[in-house]
Amino acid sequence: MSATVAQTLRASFTTSARFARYVVPALLLLSTAVSAQSSCTVQQPGRRQTRTCTVNLTASVQLPVQSLVQLNRTTTDLAGGVAAAANGGFSIAADTGIVIVGPTLRAQSNFGISVTLVNEPVFSGPALKSAADVDLGLSTMENMCTGVLMTPLSASPIAVQRNAPRVLIRSNAGMNGVMRQLCFRVRWIFASNPPGTYSLPLTINVTAP
């Protein structure tokens, strides 16, 4: 694809991160033990006498249950990638494949979560274009998509996808700064993709596993 055509066929993913924080306000609980002494009295000590008085206090804190999911950007320009002539799966007649380094996804949580993705089944734009024309892969190296396994986005309605969403990150325990680099590859078909702006919303959700 020439630079002029690539600019004309500009498209973007509008990615919204809808995530649950599951935040419970932290509470500092200061309570006396059931059987502990809660009060005492010191009588006026006599001369050269020392008397002590002891009360018991139990302090505890309820740590909030929370998670944080972040994208370093919320749009991806599908015209800014590398022509994929070397990618055998995309060297097909009338198609031009593009490889794109997408947003970086980071997740932190102090409990188990699943970070999943659903997408609109078709692009909005000057012509209908299936979401299955876009492949998605995940890399564990930031800004690197070389050699990443990619599979097509779903062309099913979002209601169907929600029953089995694409998993981006899953952990049954807490995690500290897990990163996934989103990688995209797209097919543009000259005969059926007229010039214009194409957009495909993706939605990222965070739930308990």
Image (cartoon, rainbow, N blue to C red):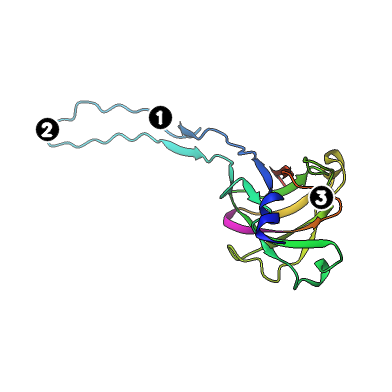
Could you say where residue 106 lies in the image, as x and y percent from the top left?
59, 53
Query: Above or below — where is 56 with respect to 3?
Result: above
Instruction: Name the residue tied to disc 3.
Output: 193
As helix, strand or loop, the secondary structure at mark 2 comes to: loop
Query: Above or below — where is 147 with respect to 176?
Result: below
- In the rendered view, does 126 fall on the left or right side of 42? right
Q: Amino acid at mark 2?
A: Arg
Asked whether residue 159 appears in the rendered view, the answer is: yes
Instruction: Name the residue tied to disc 1.
Output: 38
The residue mark sitting in front, 3 or 2, is 3
Could you say where residue 182 lies in the image, as x and y percent from the top left?
66, 57
As helix, strand or loop, the secondary structure at mark 1 comes to: loop
Numbered range of the magenta stretch = 175-184
- In the rendered view, does 76 fall on the left or right side of 132? left
Judge the density around disc 1: few (<14), some (14-19), many (≥20) Cα neighbours within 10 Å: few
Q: Amino acid at mark 1?
A: Ser
Could you say where residue 9 lies in the image, as x and y percent from the top left?
72, 50
Numbered label attached to residue 178: none
Q: Amino acid at mark 3?
A: Asn
Residue at x-position 85% and y-position 43%? 128
Q: Earlier in the sequence, mark 1 or mark 2?
A: 1
- Is 180 magenta? The answer is yes
Judge the density around disc 3: few (<14), some (14-19), many (≥20) Cα neighbours within 10 Å: some
- Is 76 magenta? The answer is no
Instruction: Name the residue tied to disc 2.
Output: 47
Q: Quadrant of residue 158?
A: top right
Q: Earlier in the sequence, mark 3 or mark 2?
A: 2
- Magenta stretch secondary structure, dominant: strand
